[in-house]
Image (cartoon, rainbow, N blue to C red):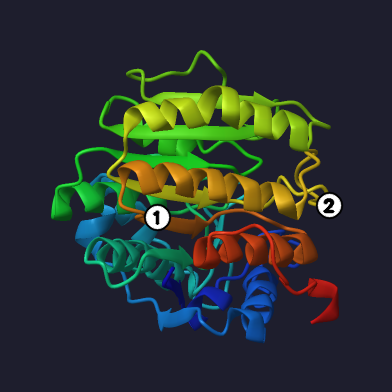
Amino acid sequence: MLTLNLSHPVCLQHQGLEGHPERPERLLAIKQMLDHPYFADLVREEAPMGRREDVLRAHPQEHLEFIESFHPEDLIEQVDADTYMNAYSLDAAMIAVGAATRAVDAVLLREFDNAFCSVRPPGHHAEANRAMGFCLFNSVAIAANYARDVYGADRVAVVDFDVHHGNGTQNIFWSDPDMFYGSSHQMPLFPGSGGLNETGEGNIFNAPLRAGDGSEQFREAYEARILPALDAFEPDILLISAGFDAHQNDPLGSLELKEEDFAWVTLKLMEIADRHADNRVISMLEGGYDLAGLASSTGVHLQALMRGTGEGDVPNYQDL
């Protein structure tokens, strides 16, 4: 597989108050992992600045203008209790949008087999009209709509294995039967959505897990609920909201996943993409707040994307 990695230095300048879990060190940990010679074949590109018209594919004009109205300069302003902006945040959020659309271009024009966007802020909590949960724009939903609007993808799927439910993606896809959203997540936990009864137009498939659940329950949720539904949906392109905060060491969740679980789910999703979507897969970074767990989990996720295997010599983050 030929895999593209999209990132940008401005994503390191988006920064909140000291101690905020969504911090630049997250990307530095991922970069340290991906700079290892094991990932020498990974193609790196600087993500382009996103376009306002692409933001409007998932958000109304009012939301875009609300985010643009913040001018923190050297200060930090709170958008809500958890979500902040500094002088670089708008640029970072627009870079995340640009990474998402460039990834769609790269994969659908067959320049690359798949792509991983290591950008921040994350996006899956941003609803159509609301920034929340560290998220300003919903990059994965923008990518999904861009694939449909620009390339005519009829059936677009997003699968989200972040420990927190992607309420924003669900909100944007809710009434659109040609958009699939499947999510495994801890419940109860922020943001409080993601119940089995939340089904949209029959296109929403939630698989809530309980605190303390680990590999067995996680894999059962996918085998019993999300993977069969995704297979039946027959997507033209598959997008992944790749949050690694379900890792057993993450401070913001209480699931007990290990690196091999992220490799397993990535490979299962790739099997379905192979059957229905000509291997077209795009992964967007979401959560993950334990730096070692984040870096190591990203490593095995990229190994699966690049090599189609969960076995190999992915470096140990502690040895980097």
Vertical relation: 70 (above or below) 199: below
**Residue sitting at 28 percent across and 55 percent down?**
55
| Residue 251 position in % (x across, y down) | 81, 50
Vertical relation: 230 (above or below) 85: above
Left or right of 240, for residue 219:
right
Q: What's under tag 1, amino acid-wise? A: Val
Q: Is residue 263 visible?
A: yes
User: Residues at badges 1 and 2 in contact (C-beta under 8 Å)?
Assistant: no
Mark 2 residue crowding within 10 angstroms, few (<14) / some (14–19) / many (20+):
many
Q: Give the CA distance from mark 1 to mark 2.
A: 27 Å
**Residue sitting at 51 percent across and 13 percent down?**
197
| Residue 32 position in % (x across, y down) | 68, 80
**Residue sitting at 73 percent across and 65 percent down?**
296
Left or right of 146, for residue 253:
right
| Residue 74 position in % (x across, y down) | 56, 78
Label 1, secondary structure: give it: strand
**Residue 224 placement: quadrant:** top right
Q: Nearer the viewer, residue 229 or 278?
A: 278
**Residue 220 placement: quadrant:** top right
Which one is closest to the eye, mark 1 or mark 2? 1
Task: Check disc 2 and report the residue beneath it.
Answer: 249
| Residue 146 position in % (x across, y down) | 23, 53
Left or right of 303, for residue 18:
right
Task: Check disc 1 and report the residue beneath it.
Answer: 281
Q: What's under tag 2, amino acid-wise? A: Asn
Going from N to C along the chain, the mark reached first, 1 or 2, is: 2
Q: Quadrant of the N terminus?
A: bottom left
Q: Quadrant of the C terminus?
A: bottom right
Left or right of 229, for residue 222:
right
Q: Nearer the viewer, residue 14 or 148?
A: 148
